[in-house]
Amino acid sequence: MTPEEIERAVEEGMPQTVEDLRRLVAIPSVAFPGHSEAPVLEAAALVERLLRAAGLPHVRQIPIEGSFPAVFAEAPAPDGAPTVLLYAHYDVQPSGDLALWRTPPFEPTVVDGIMYGRGAADDKSGVITHVAALRAFDGRFPVGVKVIIEGQEEYAGERLEAFVEANPDLLRADAMVIADVGNPEVGDPAITTSLRGMAAFTVEVRTLDEAVHSGAFGGAAPDALAALMRMLTALHDDQGNVRVPGLEPGTFPGAALGEEEFRALAGVLDGVSLVGDGSLADRLWASYAITVTGLDVPTVTGAINAVQAVARARVTIRIPASGNARQALNDVTAFLEKVAPWGVKVSFGDFVSGSGFQIEPGGPAMNAAERALERAFGRAPRQVGQGGSIPLVAALARQFPKAEILLYGAEDDGASIHAPNERLVLDELKRIITTEALFLADYGGWHGAA
């Protein structure tokens, strides 16, 4: 197929592509504990049908120990052509506070060419990118194709890592496309060359056998919540820099968005300063970040006058590609123990960790992807980092050191992933689908009948 034929096939397939995305986003496939498992399995079944309809001859669900099934598909390579592995995930983040959504999170709504709904960007756009790009070839693929669509990336992606390590031949490929990232802005093409790793844990502070009356005991009885707050605020200095020994800032060889653009995307209020030192690219892509993502304490509504006996927090660490996730966990937990006041009892649990990733540009797959992005977007792509984590990528890099790993996708920094009103620009989706189809043809040396 010529580039023009590929572009025409993608364009003609867009109505079906948008409908496929709508059907998938409508399924509340939240793979977190406490949520129904049935929708997650429903999403897996739909992904299986979509891949089969895209012309892949071998499609099946694969059990993943302790997790939801992955959907795997493959097609053999034409003589002399390389094999490409395509990755995405079909599970999504919880919707959160429904009152903050302008449209129901699992009723995908298209307004002015933008689809709103949980998972529309992260990462059901990645699933549909693969489906639609493959469909453009009508079953005559220019490369060998393997597809792995994960079912629990948002909560426990490390479980697929163990599967990869135990089944290397199943996923072995010359190039691997991870469609779980995106561009800084709509229409601004980028390839991600650096991913931060991630670690998380729960810290618990105990001071009393049980909560006691603040009038009778307050002022002498140690408050677990006050102790925990002191510990958490000690993690950063007055400028917002991480002050845990061992977690040193790094530098990124490139530029992020300008400060005003970043403030707008992040919704930073007027008069509120950004935190940390160094360039935005350094802070977002090459340095450690620590965030308190949850607190178990009494709510304001219904609060009683009591000194708290126990308080808990969930803490997340973002780790630069050069860092070690397990060492960062040790450094942060040791620091919290050191700064804990009043001899309070501190314990840790629910540990999660995943390594970061750094790629070397310049290989044949990277070059083909850059050419495809430039044609699809009408401008040359740039190389960026991502602050988010994809646990599988580091495992693939370890298992297949000779494979080129490419990261691109239809998301953008304004897509509100993991937040209310998540959205996907459908024209951006079309450009990324076109990119992927052009890449497969270019990388495969234009195999496949016209």
Image: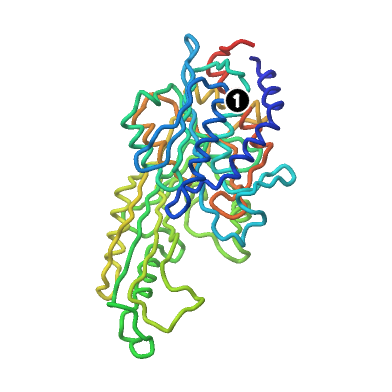
Q: Using a 10 Å C-alpha cutoff, classify the residue at mark 1 as few (fewer than 14 neighbours), some (14 to 19) or many (20 or more).
A: many
Q: Is residue 398 left or right of residue 153?
A: left
Left or right, residue 67 beside residue 59: left
- Give the x, y percent position of residue 171: 40, 26
Residue appearing at x 36%, y 32% in the figure? 164
Q: Nearer the viewer, residue 116 or 60?
A: 60
Q: Relative to residue 260, is residue 321 depicted above or below?
A: above
Q: Residue at x 44, y 35 (%)?
A: 70
Outermost residue, bottom side:
216
Q: Which element is circle 1 on?
A: helix
The relative height of residue 438 versus residue 390 in the rendered view (above or below) is above
On the image, the x and y values in percent for residue 192 come to 51, 37
Q: Nearer the viewer, residue 48 or 352?
A: 48
Residue 435 lies in quadrant: top right
The percent position of residue 193, horizontal first and vertical second, equals 48, 36
Q: Residue furthest front?
A: 38
Q: Which residue is mark 1?
A: 372
- Residue found at x 43% / y 48%: 155
